[in-house]
Amino acid sequence: MEAQSFKDRHILEGPVTPVLFAVAVPLMINNLINSLYNLADGLWVAQLSLVEFAATSFVWPPHFLFVSLGVGIAIAGTAIISQLIGSENKPRAESYATHVFYFCLGLGVVFSIVGYFLSPSIVQWMGATGELRSYASTYLSVLMAGFIFEMIYLSYFAILGAQGKTKMTTVISASAAILNAILDPFFIFDRVPFLGIPGLGLGISGAALAT
């Protein structure tokens, strides 16, 4: 508790530049790590076919649209909670943190259901045809089915960020990115490259599932 109180005082009363860097640098690294998800998927899926590789990039805009909505809510939550922490209104800050979590959870359920069922239509509206349409629909559907977990992460991102614990969010993101890179080949291929051990052979669905 004393260590946390010291950190709170340092954020609120310390020199602006060091505090800014201490909070911002982990966030910058976190954003870089998040961009590695699609890169990892693309590197493995490219070994299946060029069409499947193209599908992972094709669905990025609609998926990012949903992510942007979630990030907007997380930023709003961070702003409100951090103001309450700064004014030393801890009980109300805890109440808002709880509301942010459950709001993100509920919205995650809605986004997952809507995104899953609308994925084929979204891909069609974007002009995809043939194999690209099939693979892109599959990939986006699986991504959106698990979108609730992204919203849960964003709620924790908001709550921890409001407390200045940006290093913790970076550690979580890095761990998830590493796990995704490890799971990808096991989920995608019948036989894992380089290791030669059996995999699940789910193809592009496996890449989305690992993500």
Image (cartoon, rainbow, N blue to C red):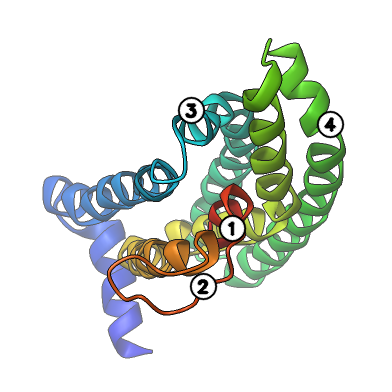
Residue 83 spot, x, y in % from top left: 51, 51
Q: Residue at x 70, y 49 (%)?
A: 142
Badge number at residue 206: 1
161 vs 78, left or right, is left
Mark before the other along the chain sequence, 4 or 3? 3
Q: In front: 207, or 161?
A: 207
Q: Disc 1 or disc 2, which is closer to the eye?
A: 2
Kindly state the secondary structure of the residue where label 4 is placed. Answer: helix
* Residue indicated by mark 3: 54
Q: Disc 2 or disc 3, which is closer to the eye?
A: 2
Kindly state the secondary structure of the residue where label 1 is placed. Answer: helix
Q: CA distance from mark 4 to mark 3?
A: 20 Å
Q: CA distance from mark 2 to mark 3?
A: 23 Å
Q: Disc 4 or disc 3, which is closer to the eye?
A: 3
Q: CA distance from mark 1 to mark 2?
A: 10 Å
Kindly state the secondary structure of the residue where label 2 is placed. Answer: loop
Mark before the other along the chain sequence, 4 or 1? 4
What quarter of the picture does the N terminus occupy?
bottom left
Mark before the other along the chain sequence, 2 or 3? 3
* Residue 191 appears in the rendering: yes
Q: Residue at x 51, y 72 (%)?
A: 199
- Give the amino acid type for the residue marked by disc 3 in the picture: Ala
* Residue 163 appears in the rendering: no
* Residue indicated by mark 2: 199
